Image (tube, rainbow, N blue to C red):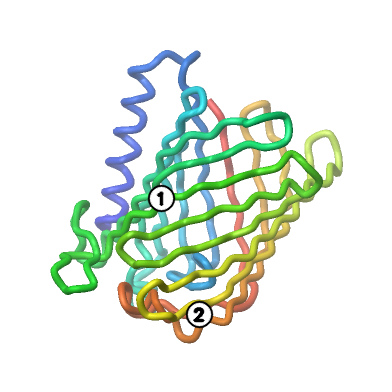
Amino acid sequence: MNRAALFALFILGASMSAIGAASAQSVEVSTTVAFESRYVFRGVQFAETSIQPAINLSYGNLYLNSWFNLPIGDDDLVVTPGGEELDLIAGYSASLNDLISYDIGLTYYVFPDLASGFFDVLREDGDGLGANTLEPYLGVAFDAALAPSVYLYHDFFLDTTTVQGNVSHSFPLSEKASFDLGGYIGYVFDDVGGADYLYGTASADLSYTLSDSGSVYTSLRYSGSDIAGGAVFDDAILGTRQAGGFWWGVGFSADF
């Protein structure tokens, strides 16, 4: 078992221990396990075929999420080192009024297969021991047609600022099935090197509800960007490459 898988099991075990310590009425839990033919993030492909498990905890307006990307096979480590990834997310989301809600939080990106310990962060001056980064974010969402939202991110260690807009809409097909469309477009500002770029992704999901707490989906996605060869990400994670084209995925989610 590789280090990322061991790390994933550790975090999942710790999360489940936290669940057991709280009452079922106070903490809401959801999980997802997905298979993706590519792992694409903001117009950059970090891995090919991957398993992506996640566990999400919420307590009132507070939430804590853990998400993993675990590449399948050794080829991904040669083509795109950095494909193993753990994202830890903590945030607070609430409504301002009947129309507007906000979301504020922090993401810590960990890359176990780049010889990075949990606290080894990227340093542009060469003093850093790894590639891990920290990124706060702020989002505003509107209760309107297409469920629009806008998010602002700033990565302290990559020195990048990202603005992203999102839209989505669901078409009910039956009592249990739906056809879900979504998309986002964003722009990354490289605060140091000036390697700014534009990216976007569109998705179409067919979802089916199995029970009150479980559902499955299959998806088709398209990503594009004007980034050249990975640009700013190449400074931190060698081998990442521009993503353009289609990929697909399947997944299962459950609530507890």
Left or right relative to 187: residue 194: left
Mark 2 residue element: strand
At label 1, the amino acid type is: Pro
Q: Which residue is mark 1?
A: 136
User: How far apart are labels 1 and 2 at the CA level?
Assistant: 24 Å
Image height of 61 relative to 55, above or below: above
Give residue 236's quadrant in the image. bottom left
**What residue occupies the far bottom of the structure in this picture?**
228
Q: Nearer the viewer, residue 138 or 30?
A: 138
Q: Quadrant of the N terminus?
A: bottom left
Q: Nearer the viewer, residue 127 or 4?
A: 127
Are there few (<14), some (14-19), or many (20+) residues within 10 Å of tag 2?
A: many
Are there few (<14), some (14-19), or many (20+) residues within 10 Å of tag 1?
A: some
Give residue 255's quadrant in the image. top right
Q: x, y (%) of residue 61?
A: 51, 27
Residue drawn at (74%, 39%) of the image: 143
Q: x, y (%) of residue 75?
A: 37, 76
Image height of 27 relative to 194, above or below: above
Q: Which residue is mark 2?
A: 242
Of the residues under marks 1 and 2, which one precedes in the sequence? 1
Q: Nearer the viewer, residue 29 or 3?
A: 29
At label 2, the amino acid type is: Gln
Q: x, y (%) of residue 109?
A: 35, 55
